[in-house]
Image (spheres, rainbow, N blue to C red):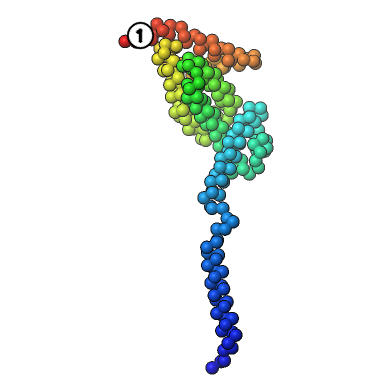
Amino acid sequence: MAKVEPYSVLYGTVFRLSSRGAMNDKSKNQDDGLEPQVNIDRRVRADAQRNIVALLQAALAVFATSGVDAPVREIAEKAGVGIGTVYRHFPQRADLIAAVFRREIDACADAAAILADAYDPFDALEHWMQRYAAFVATKRGLATALYSGNSAFDPLPAYFNQRLRPAIQTLLESAIAVGAVRSDVDAEDILGAVRGLCRAADDGRPGQTQRMIALFADGLRYGARASTNPPA
């Protein structure tokens, strides 16, 4: 039987005890200096959202000046991100164009509640019509792509109706209720009239569209009180 040196037994015991202590310390302190994964995930999501917003804002500006076929690199540089970030969020150009259009629909729709809180019913309606005219200008700039037949744009008409019609309807009903606007006008009348005025005023004269919409809004007052049911 092999002889076991006493110092070997002592060394082995000390090594096992110290190793066990180190493992326990590592287990207890394994998160020291490390950020919880949930916080990292939240920060990544927040950064990604900021990048998306920056890209959509940049794309809208670039499309307005250079058209929808503008180089992706131009959009990335304006947004302050790498070109890979553009493709990570919007693999196809059509995806980016559709996202820009949806964002403009949302901004126009959301403006209705903001204007309703800030102005009386008639002024809120007129301000929203001016905001809608700006949206029409955006749509006109994207028209070549939007009517190209690409399937990425197929859901947009339904989304337009879902978001914008209720917005204008609420403002219009409020204006009618206080006798500020004639009662025989509906949401489609407003939307169609503003689109038509935008086309008619597209002659390069600064502020012409805004002036024509203001005149149209003023015309909505004609006969308003006569067509509003008097209070009981």
Tell me the residue at 54%/21% (across/down).
131
**Which residue is drawn at the image coordinates 51% and 29% (left, top)?**
106
User: 155 or 162: nearer the eye?
Assistant: 162
224 on left or right of 27: left
Q: Amino acid at mark 1?
A: Pro
Residue 110 visible in the current orientation:
yes
Q: Nearer the viewer, residue 222 or 3?
A: 3
Disc 1 is placed on an element classified as loop
Q: Give percent across and percent down for residue 107.
A: 53, 28
User: Residue visible at 44% across and 15% down?
Assistant: 175
Q: Position of residue 85 (x, y in %)?
A: 61, 43
Q: Determine which residue is flagged by label 1.
A: 230
Work out whether 222 lies above or below 92: above
Q: Is residue 206 above or below residue 83?
A: above
Residue under the image location 58 percent in, 15 percent down = 209
Q: Which residue reaches farthest bottom?
A: 1
Say which quarter of the image contains residue 1.
bottom right
Q: Quadrant of the C terminus?
A: top left
Place residue 9 in its image quadrant.
bottom right
Q: Residue furthest left?
A: 232
Please determine whether, in this image, residue 110 is positioned above or below residue 2.
above
Pick the front one: 219 or 64: 219
Q: Residues within 10 Å of mark 1 (few under 14, many from 20)?
A: few
Instruction: Give residue 201's position: percent from left, percent from top.
Output: 59, 14
Q: Is residue 112 visible?
A: no
Q: Position of residue 230 (x, y in %)?
A: 35, 8
Give the total number of marks visible in the rendering.
1
